[in-house]
């Protein structure tokens, strides 16, 4: 299931939604023991405007407890969208986040609410009419009300326009092949770093394929990052690395350097092979954990043509735990593909 992962604080700033007032000291303080938690947070969704190019919903989180709570913004406004009972694929940004800071948390006072309005047509294909149900899906809240609306005509999806920054193209030898890299709005030093990262990522993916071919029953590193063996899950992992290797050794890959957001990178799953590099990407190591090369593996795994992973959890600790507790989600989680490849 694809789910809406746009950070709530970004959406609130974008539309000017009123938010609870807190002091500057409170706003800048990191979450502390005794004030951080999710106990008592409930969530509702209401349908707003329905037009030929919009289906807006209002998500509201309410703190029903007697204490102030801090909630990681990106984990809060997660929605599940279905049409006639069938999940509607998410087509918005899929992001590799940097480690959260105090600024990434939303503080909701006791009895307070936090609300945001979203246009689902920005991130979902609503072109087919039907009965749409939108429900809170975050594990950080207790869902108390979903919303349903029936449409009789399709709703047009918002169009994304390509960046207008200057672009240059270079043919680069990577692993056993040659990839065409289009640099969009990149400086000379950024181009140099990208060229190395693409080559390193191609090598990582190729080595991942080789390891899997040599260990057809899983075990070892496969178990660490993808969990207990099953033929179907193993086949999905093998197929994903095959497609990623093909991308990084034979396709045209566009790397966009124009973002000023504090992520590592993001992609749109149905727009292969365009990767938007962000502020956290540039200081990352060339290889190793959460590296430049590994980030390219992570983002490439999101492309629908490469298998279409999601972001269920972030970070090595959570990824390892996911492999133990839910192998089906582990083989659908981009960080697990990155960390397996970075360990080759």
Image (tube, grey):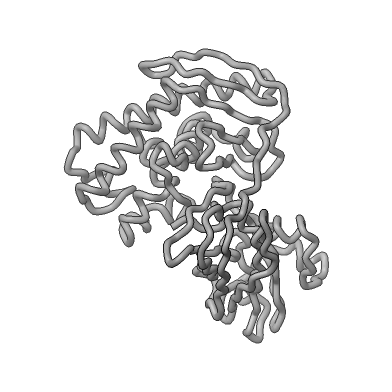
Placement of 259 over or under 228, stated as above or below: above
Could you say which quadrant of the image residue 245 lies in? Answer: top left
Is the residue 145 above or below the residue 156 in the image?
below
Q: Residue 188 in the image: x percent, y percent?
A: 67, 18
Who's the residue at 52% across and 13% down the image?
A: 171
Q: Nearer the viewer, residue 77 or 339?
A: 77
Q: Is residue 190 visible?
A: yes
Q: Give the percent coordinates (x, y) of residue 179.
A: 47, 18
* Rendered-image quadrant of the C terminus: top left
Picture quadrant of residue 306: top left
Q: Residue furthest front?
A: 152
Residue 110 placement (x, y as % from top left): 69, 82
The answer to which quarter of the image holds residue 113 is: bottom right
Number of marks drawn? 0
Residue lying furthest left: 217
Asked whether, in this view, residue 124 is left or right of residue 241, the answer is right
- Where is residue 288 shown, x and y percent of the image? 45, 35
325 or 11, nearer to the observer = 11
Please indicate, yes or no, whether residue 102 appears anywhere in the rendered image.
no
Q: Is residue 28 left or right of residue 61?
A: right
Picture quarter with the N terminus: bottom left
Tell me what residue is drawn at x 72 percent, y 28 percent: 164
Which residue does the image show at 61% across and 36% down from the upper left?
276
Q: For this rendering, which residue is in front, 155 or 313?
A: 155
Tell me the residue at 62%/50% (across/down): 156
Q: Using residue 122 as the reference point, say whether residue 176 is left or right of it.
A: left
């Amino acid at each position: 299931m694809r789910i809406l992962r746009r950070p709530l604080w970004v959406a609130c700033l974008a539309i000017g939604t009123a938010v609870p007032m807190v002091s500057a000291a409170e706003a800048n303080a990191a979450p502390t023991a005794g004030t951080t938690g999710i106990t008592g947070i409930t969530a509702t969704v209401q349908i707003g405007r329905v037009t030929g190019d919009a289906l807006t919903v209002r998500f509201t989180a309410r703190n029903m407890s007697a204490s102030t709570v801090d909630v990681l913004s990106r984990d809060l406004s997660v929605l599940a969208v279905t049409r006639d009972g069938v999940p509607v694929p998410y087509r918005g940004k899929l992001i590799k986040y940097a480690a959260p800071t105090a600024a990434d948390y939303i503080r909701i006072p006791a009895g307070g609410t936090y609300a945001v309005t979203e246009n689902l047509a920005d991130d979902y294909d609503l072109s087919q009419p039907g009965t749409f149900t939108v429900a809170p899906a975050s594990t950080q809240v207790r869902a108390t009300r979903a919303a349903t609306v029936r449409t009789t005509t399709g709703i047009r999806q918002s169009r994304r326009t390509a960046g207008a920054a200057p672009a240059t193209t270079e043919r680069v030898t990577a692993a056993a092949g040659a990839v065409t890299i289009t640099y969009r709005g990149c400086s000379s030093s950024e181009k140099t770093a990208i060229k190395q990262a693409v080559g390193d990522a191609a090598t990582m993916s190729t080595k991942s394929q080789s390891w899997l071919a040599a260990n057809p029953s899983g075990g070892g590193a496969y178990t660490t990052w993808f969990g207990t063996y099953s033929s179907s899950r193993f086949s999905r992992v093998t197929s994903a690395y095959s497609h990623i290797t093909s991308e990084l050794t034979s396709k045209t890959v566009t790397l966009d350097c124009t973002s000023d957001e504090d992520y590592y990178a993001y992609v749109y799953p149905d727009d292969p092979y365009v990767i938007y590099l962000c502020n956290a990407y540039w200081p990352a190591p060339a290889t190793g954990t959460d590296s430049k090369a590994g980030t390219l593996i992570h983002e490439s795994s999101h492309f629908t043509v490469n298998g279409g992973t999601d972001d269920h959890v972030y970070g090595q600790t959570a990824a390892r735990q996911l492999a133990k507790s839910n192998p089906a989600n582990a083989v659908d989680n981009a960080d697990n593909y990155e960390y397996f490849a970075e360990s080759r």
